[in-house]
């Protein structure tokens, strides 16, 4: 492989690795933001909300720009009703028709509920398809750059495996950037990463299959080449024997004359 072709292959491999991380991240977000996942992950937040009332008379919070104070005794006594109300509010916020582009919603919406809405799920799903298409294009280019095509599945499989490990650590990496004073927000991250394990296994297993396929084809190809070589050597040996017998026959006829 020439220097130029090798350089292109290296650049495309790095680009593919980045695209795999992006594709996996978008798939994680879009999968995690299904309503059933959002609703399930909000429950622990409600429990924390109730537990924060220990030792306090009132719990004060801001909702839609208004400061609301609720007696803690009322919250504890009506825990079930509170959860039902929050579930209803979560459902309304999830399916709300947000009349704004995704990133513009930060400026137009007073609360960031759109981040865990159907709008967000569809947004990340669309980005996932774009990233997936770009990854497939790069995969095709890499395939044609390989002189030995059997190395293609080994390389791509390895990239899938490494990217899957980083995707699995995505939540830990994101949590590390949250200041200590906002650690309670880390629980909120569970909503965005609830399906990260599923995406990890998809990428990891696909990577193993590709590596296994590449190695399997390599070993099969080696056996095939070995058999062809042995057959070629045997053919050459038979030709030498035939030639030698023919020469002996010719010499014998000459001697008889």
Image (tube, rainbow, N blue to C red):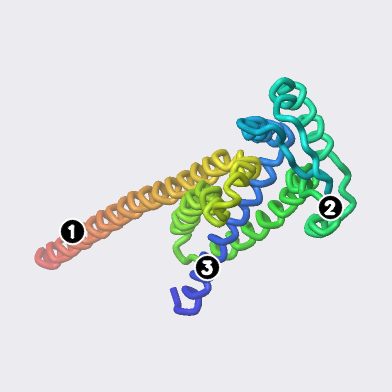
**Nearer mark to the viewer, of 1 and 3:** 3
- Could you tell me if the residues under marks 2 and 3 are in contact, i.e. CB atoms within 8 Å? no
Q: CA distance from mark 1 to mark 3?
A: 50 Å
Is residue 101 placed above or below 114 in the rendered structure? Answer: below
Which of the two discs, 1 and 2, labels the residue nearer the N terminus?
2
Give 242 or 29, whichever is nearer the viewer. Answer: 29
Residue displayed at 49% across by 56% down: 159
- Assess disc 2: are there few (<14), some (14-19) or many (≥20) residues with their C-alpha within 10 Å of its C-alpha: some
Residue identified by numbered label 1: 245
Which residue is drawn at the image coordinates 83% and 49% (left, top)? 65
Category of crowding for the residue at label 1, using alpha-carbon neighbours closer than 10 angstroms: few (below 14), some (14–19), many (at least 20): few
Q: Residues within 10 Å of mark 3 (few under 14, many from 20)?
A: some
Query: Of label 1 and label 3, which has the lower sequence position?
Result: 3
Distance of mark 1 from mark 2, alpha carbons?
96 Å
Q: Which residue is mark 3?
A: 145
Q: Residue 68 location, x and y as percent?
A: 80, 40
Percent across and percent down for residue 123 are 76, 51
Q: Residue 202's quadrant in the figure?
A: top right
Mark number displayed over residue 188: none
Upstream in the sequence, badge 2 or badge 3?
2
Q: Which residue is mark 2?
A: 109
**What SS does tag 2 mark?**
loop
Name the element at disc 1.
Answer: helix
User: How far is mark 2 from mark 3, CA to CA?
Assistant: 48 Å
Vertical side of 50 occupied by 124: above or below: below
């Amino acid at each position: 492989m020439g220097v130029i072709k090798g350089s292109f292959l290296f650049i495309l491999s790095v680009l593919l690795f980045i695209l795999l991380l992006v594709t996996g991240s978008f798939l994680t977000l879009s999968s995690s933001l299904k309503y059933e996942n959002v609703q399930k992950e909000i429950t622990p937040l409600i429990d924390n909300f109730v537990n924060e009332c220990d030792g306090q008379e009132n719990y004060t919070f801001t909702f839609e720009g208004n400061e609301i104070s609720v007696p803690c005794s009322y919250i504890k006594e009506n825990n079930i009703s509170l959860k039902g109300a929050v579930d209803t509010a979560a459902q309304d916020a999830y399916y709300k028709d947000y009349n704004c582009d995704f990133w513009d919603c930060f400026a137009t919406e007073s609360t960031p509920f759109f981040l865990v809405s159907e709008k967000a799920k569809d947004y990340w799903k669309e980005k996932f398809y774009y990233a997936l298409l770009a990854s497939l294009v790069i995969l095709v280019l890499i395939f044609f750059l390989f002189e030995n095509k059997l190395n293609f599945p080994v390389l791509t499989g390895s990239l899938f495996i490494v990217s899957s490990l980083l995707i699995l650590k995505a939540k830990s990496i994101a949590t590390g950037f949250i200041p200590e004073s906002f650690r309670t927000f880390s629980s909120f991250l569970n909503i965005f990463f609830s399906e990260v394990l599923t995406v990890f296994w998809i990428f990891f297993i696909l990577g193993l299959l590709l590596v296994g396929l590449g190695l399997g084809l390599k070993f099969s190809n080696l056996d095939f080449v070995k058999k062809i070589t042995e057959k070629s050597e045997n053919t050459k040996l038979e030709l030498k024997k035939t030639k030698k017998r023919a020469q002996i026959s010719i010499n014998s006829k000459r001697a008889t004359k």
